Image: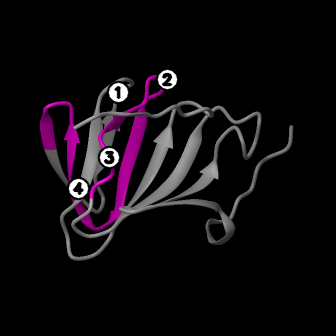
Amino acid sequence: MTPTITDLQTAETETFPWGAIRWLCHDRIDPAAEQTLGIAYINPGQSNPLHFHPNCEELLYVLSGECEHTVGEAVFPLKAGMMLRIPPGVKHKALATGKAPLTVVISFSSGDRQTVLCAE
């Protein structure tokens, strides 16, 4: 068994109109990975799309910025230092409400994180 080492500076990055995700671990980086880990950035005033993960829970830890995170029908204000657990299959999205980008650590309980986008 060999450990996996990744570097945020050179990590695989997905860019979107609302921000970006830098992936540090998943089953395409390491086929033996049983978890997914990344850093997500959401631009001020922007939101990622409403979505859910059918095969895993998500832990989200706010490093910097502020957001209103919609989980199901509830809205939770989050700021740096706060963590949110989202159960599998629950629709959610984050709206960056501060003047600076929202930066969050996102962790999933599967190396093969699946995402389903929802109509709003």
Q: Which residues are magenta?
A: 47-75
Kindly report the distance in space between the C-alpha atoms of the residues bearing marks 3 and 1: 17 Å
Residue 55: x and y in percent read 49, 23
Residue ID at (50%, 37%)? 108
Residue occupying image coordinates x 20% and y 70%: 98
Q: Which residue is mark 1?
A: 87
> Which secondary structure lies at badge 4?
strand
Q: Which residue is mark 4?
A: 95
Quadrant in which the N terminus is drawn: top right
Real-space Cα separation, disc 1 to disc 2, in angstroms: 10 Å
| Label whose residue precedes the other's in the sequence (1 or 2) | 2
Q: CA distance from mark 3 to mark 2?
A: 18 Å
Q: Quick one: SS at disc 3?
A: loop
- The amino acid on which the numbered mark 2 sits, given as a three-letter code, is Asn
Residue 55 badge: 2
The residue at which mark 3 appears reads as: 49
Q: Earlier in the sequence, mark 3 or mark 1?
A: 3
Residue 63 is inside the magenta segment: yes
